[in-house]
Image (cartoon, helix red, strand yellow):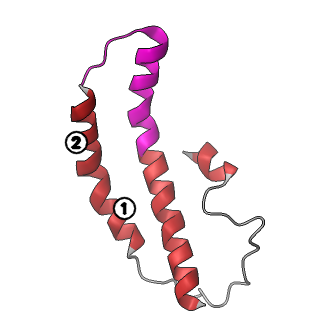
Amino acid sequence: VEEGRLIFDNLKKSIAYTLSSNIPEITPFLVFIVLQIPLGLTTVLILLIDLGTDLLPAIALAYEAKEADIMMKPPRDSRTDRLVTRKLISFS
């Protein structure tokens, strides 16, 4: 149970980081499509920057150590506590 809680917490942190860091990278493409403003960087260059800046922090979050009170928390409700929630998406 402890390992499952640790994996769930770390996955949630990694997904939150990835979403919050990739939304600004998608915005230029949306502006290009909607307003026909040319891109400052090529698509491949933006993908390379994304890989270089997001890979190591996301891996570090996935292997983060457990919190001290992980077993003191009540069991999560599988109907309400999901990996990706509306709150997380709006935070991104």
Query: In the displayed structure, would residue 82 be above or below residue 23?
Result: below
User: Which residue is tagged 1?
Assistant: 58
Looking at the rendered structure, the secondary structure element under dot 2 is: helix
Taking 72 as reference, is 26 left or right? left
Image quarter (top left, top right, bottom left or bottom right) of the C terminus: top right
Q: Name the residue type under label 1.
A: Ala
Query: In the displayed structure, would residue 43 be above or below residue 19?
Result: above
Crowd class of label 2 (few under 14; some 14 to 19; many from 20; radius 10 Å): few
Q: Name the residue type under label 2.
A: Leu
Which numbered marker is on residue 24? none
- Mark 1 and mark 2: span between their CA atoms? 15 Å
Asked whether residue 68 appears in the rendered view, the answer is no
Which numbered marker is on residue 48? 2
Residue 65, x across and y down, in percent: 42, 82
Q: Residue at x 50, y 68 (%)?
A: 11
Residue 5, x across and y down, in percent: 58, 81
Image quarter (top left, top right, bottom left or bottom right) of the N terminus: bottom right
Residue 62, x across and y down, in percent: 41, 71
> Could you tell which of marks 1 and 2 lies nearer the N-terminus?
2
Asked whether residue 62 appears in the rendered view, the answer is yes
Q: Residue at x 45, y 16 (%)?
A: 33
Which of 48 and 67 lies nearest the eye of the viewer?
A: 48
Q: Over which residues does the magenta segment extend?
A: 22-41
Taking 9 as reference, is 44 left or right? left
Which of 26 and 73 lies nearest the eye of the viewer?
A: 26
Asked if marks 1 and 2 touch (Cβ < 8 Å), the reply is: no
Looking at the rendered structure, the secondary structure element under dot 1 is: helix
